[in-house]
Image (cartoon, rainbow, N blue to C red):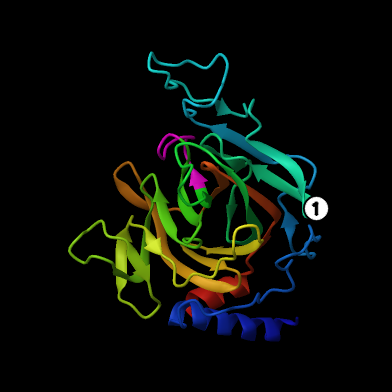
C-alpha cells in the first residue's frame, strides 16, 4: 500500500476510534495482511515480528505465585493447614504449567492454569500492534473448577512480579474470560480514561460499560465492560488485536473493536505518570488455554498521528 493510500486508510480508522463509531463494529487491519482466524501458525508478513518460535518458550519468562493447596510442589513451604506460604517463583515450573504442544496441526503455547501466574515477555514494548490467537482447553482447576474459564493478556507490565494479587505485574489487562473477552481490568492500580456509563452511578467502584458516544470518565481503575460479545464457542480459535499508541490502547476481538482507553498512567511516588510501554503477560488462571500466532509490529508515525489526531 503506498503512503497516500495508507494515510487515507489510517485516517478512516482514526476517525472511527477517536470519533465514536458504533459499538462493536467490525474493523479490518490498515497496515497490511495479518494471519487470520483459523490459520495454522502462518508466518507473519515482513513488518511482523513473531513472539513465539513454535519450538520453545525462548524470549519468555515464567512466574508462578503461591499454588493452591491441592497442587503438589515438593519442597515448597506449607502452613499447618496445608496452604502454601511461598511462591514458586521466576522460571521455576516443575508442574509444566507452561509448555509447547501441537494443536490442530500446528505448534501452540499451552497454559495449563493449574497454578496462578504468568508467561512474561523478556522484552518491553511500546507503540505497537499485537496480534494473537487463543482457544480454550478442557482442564479446570481449583479454586475455579466451575466458574467461567479465565486468562488474560496484560500489557505495559512493569515493576515486581506478584504486585497484583500476588501473581501478576502492574499492568493493563485485556481480559480473556468466557463471556467477557475484551474487557479491561486494572492490575495493581493502573489508571485510564474511557468513554462509558457506570452500571451503578451511585457506586464509585461500579463497572463501566464502554460506549464511544458516552461521557468521558477520567481517572478510573474500574473494570470496563466491552462493547459487545463476539467471542467464539469454547474449542474454536479467537483472534485478538491490541493497538497501543502513546497513552492510548484499543482492544479488538475477532475484528470487532471492544474498548478504547486513553490517558494510560500509573502512580509513582504519589504522582501520576504516563505508562506507555512494558512487558507482556499471558495469565495462568485456573483454566487450560492455548495461544498461537503471536506477533507484534511497530505502529508507524503516520498511524500514530492519524489515531491521535483523527
Which quadrant does the N terminus fall into?
A: bottom right
Relative image position of residue 45 (x, y in whole percent): 79, 65
Q: Main secondary structure of the magenta part?
A: loop
Residue 297 position by quadrant: bottom right
Could you tell me which secondary element the residue under label 1 belongs to? strand
Q: Residue furthest left?
A: 202
- Residue 184 rendering spot, x and y as whole percentages: 43, 59
Left or right: 289, with 55 as reference point = left
Q: Viewed as shown, does residue 102 lie left or right of 261?
A: right
Q: Is residue 117 above or below residue 11?
A: above
Residue visible at 38% across and 75% down? 211
Q: Position of residue 127 (x, y in %)?
A: 58, 61
Q: Nearer the viewer, residue 16 or 26?
A: 26
Magenta stretch containing residue 176, yes or no?
Answer: no
Where 226 falls versus 178 (above or below)?
A: below
Q: Residues within 10 Å of mark 1 (few under 14, many from 20)?
A: some
Q: Which residue is mark 1?
A: 106
**Residue at image location 56% in from the left, 35% down from the top:** 114
Relative to residue 277, is residue 305 depicted above or below? below
What residue is shown at x 45% (from left), y 21% (from top)? Answer: 84
Q: Above or below — where is 174 with respect to 82?
A: below
Residue under the image location 29 percent in, 44 percent down: 270
Q: Nearer the viewer, residue 239 or 52?
A: 239
Where in the figure is residue 90, as x and y percent of width and height?
A: 58, 29
Taking the magenta stretch, the answer to whether it contains residue 165 is: yes
Q: Is residue 33 left or right of residue 81?
A: right
User: Quick check: 207 left or right of 181?
Assistant: left
Q: Magenta residues?
A: 157-166
- Image label count: 1
- Determine the residue located farthest toward the front in the rendered image: 146
Amino acid at each position: 500500500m503506498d503512503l497516500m493510500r495508507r494515510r487515507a486508510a489510517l485516517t478512516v480508522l482514526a476517525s472511527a476510534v477517536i470519533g465514536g463509531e458504533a459499538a462493536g463494529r467490525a474493523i479490518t487491519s490498515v497496515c497490511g495482511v495479518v494471519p487470520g482466524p483459523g490459520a495454522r501458525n502462518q508466518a507473519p508478513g515482513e513488518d511482523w515480528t513473531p513472539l513465539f518460535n513454535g519450538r520453545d518458550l525462548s524470549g519468555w519468562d515464567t512466574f508462578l505465585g503461591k499454588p493452591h493447596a491441592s497442587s503438589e510442589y515438593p519442597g515448597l513451604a506449607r502452613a499447618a493447614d496445608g496452604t502454601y506460604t511461598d511462591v514458586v517463583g521466576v522460571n521455576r515450573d516443575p508442574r509444566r504449567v507452561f509448555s509447547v504442544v501441537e494443536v490442530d496441526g500446528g505448534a501452540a503455547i499451552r497454559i495449563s492454569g493449574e497454578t496462578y501466574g504468568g508467561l512474561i515477555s523478556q522484552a518491553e514494548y511500546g507503540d505497537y500492534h499485537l496480534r494473537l490467537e487463543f482457544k480454550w482447553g478442557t482442564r479446570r482447576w481449583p479454586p475455579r473448577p466451575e466458574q467461567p474459564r479465565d486468562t488474560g493478556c496484560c500489557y505495559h507490565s512493569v515493576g515486581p512480579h506478584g504486585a497484583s494479587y500476588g501473581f501478576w505485574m502492574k499492568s493493563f489487562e485485556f481480559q480473556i474470560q468466557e463471556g467477557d473477552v475484551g474487557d479491561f481490568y486494572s492490575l495493581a492500580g493502573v489508571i485510564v480514561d474511557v468513554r462509558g456509563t457506570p452500571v451503578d452511578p451511585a457506586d464509585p467502584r461500579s463497572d463501566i460499560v464502554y460506549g464511544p458516544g458516552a461521557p468521558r470518565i477520567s481517572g478510573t481503575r474500574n473494570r470496563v465492560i466491552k462493547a459487545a460479545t463476539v467471542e467464539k464457542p469454547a474449542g474454536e480459535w479467537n483472534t485478538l488485536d491490541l493497538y497501543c499508541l502513546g497513552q492510548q490502547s484499543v482492544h479488538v476481538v475477532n475484528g470487532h473493536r471492544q474498548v478504547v482507553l486513553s490517558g494510560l498512567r500509573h502512580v509513582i511516588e504519589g504522582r501520576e505518570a504516563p505508562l506507555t510501554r512494558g512487558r507482556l503477560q499471558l495469565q495462568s488462571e485456573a483454566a487450560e488455554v492455548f495461544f498461537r500466532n503471536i506477533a507484534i509490529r511497530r505502529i508507524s508515525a503516520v498511524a500514530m498521528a492519524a489515531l491521535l489526531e483523527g
